[in-house]
Amino acid sequence: MSSLTFTKLSVGPMDNNAYLLRCTSTGDGLLIDAANDAERLLQLIGSNPGGISTVVTTHRHQDHWFALEDVVAATGAASLAHAADASEIPGVTGTLADGDTLSLGDCDLTVIHLVGHTPGSIALHHDGHLWTGDALFPGGVGNTWGDKANFESLINDVTTKIFDRFPDETEFHPGHGADSTLGAERPSLPEWRARGW
């Protein structure tokens, strides 16, 4: 499997994580969440030869796409999001669905639809790494604001589509804050479900 490198950058007043992914064999680049501070994001992209071909927005909340239009205008990148959230995100040029494969040079990323934080929240997976947006954090799933149906949907999707599918050593990289592994979080799943958030 072709290797992929990534750089994490915290931007904006809500300390959003943006991730620049790059295929090591071709140099092709992809940005996850043009969240804020377009100037810093473009500096990061520009310091890596090859620029970017795609920006993926993990979900519709504005703190994850505040710089999207500026980054797309400067790079000419395609702008992708899940179909259920795309209408709420300005400048989306294409939509994604659960199970889609995104090609980044010789590397493939798999789209995982995780419903509950928003209707169209997604994670991306490649070779032992998950970029989870606001669907999964160390210590719990994303905020569902006390909506029991949304919480049930999210905890079920995170359990079946992530924890039941990938091994403990899988690293995940959320939309805010620190990274973790599935193994570190797996023992807490019953507690998360019982507390309801």
Image (cartoon, rainbow, N blue to C red):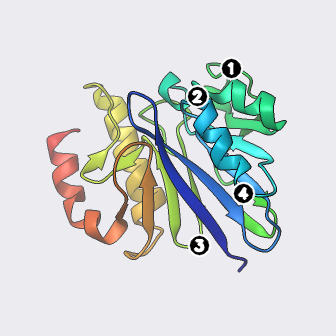
What crowding class fits label 4: few (fewer than 14 Cα within 10 Å), some (14-19), or many (20 or more)? some
Q: Residue furthest bottom?
A: 1
**Label 1 crowd bin: few (<14), some (14–19), many (20+), radius 10 Å:** some
Position of 125 with respect to 168 (left or right) is right
Residue with the mark numbered 4:
48
Quadrant placement of the C terminus: top left
Q: Distance of mark 3 from mark 1, alpha carbons? A: 30 Å
Q: Amino acid at mark 2?
A: Trp
Determine which quarter of the picture holds residue 50.
bottom right
Circle 4 sits in a helix, a strand or a loop, which is it? Answer: loop
**CB under 8 Å between discs 3 and 4:** no
| Count of marks, rendered view | 4
Q: Is residue 167 above or below residue 111?
A: below
Q: Residue at x 56, y 39 (%)?
A: 58
The type of residue carrying mark 1 is Pro
Name the residue rendered at 73%, 48% in the picture: 46
Q: Secondary structure at mark 2?
A: loop
Place of residue 176 in the rendered image (x, y in percent of width and height, measured from the top left): 39, 43
Instruction: Inspect the image, locate mark 4, and give the three-letter code of the amino acid beneath it.
Output: Asn
Q: Earlier in the sequence, mark 1 or mark 4?
A: 4
Looking at the image, residue 31 sits to the left or right of residue 112; the answer is right
Q: Which residue is mark 3?
A: 127
Which one is earlier in the sequence, the residue at label 3 or at label 4?
A: 4
Circle 1 SS class:
loop
Element marked by disc 3 = loop
Q: Which residue is mark 1?
A: 90
In primary-sequence order, the first of circles 2 and 4 is 4
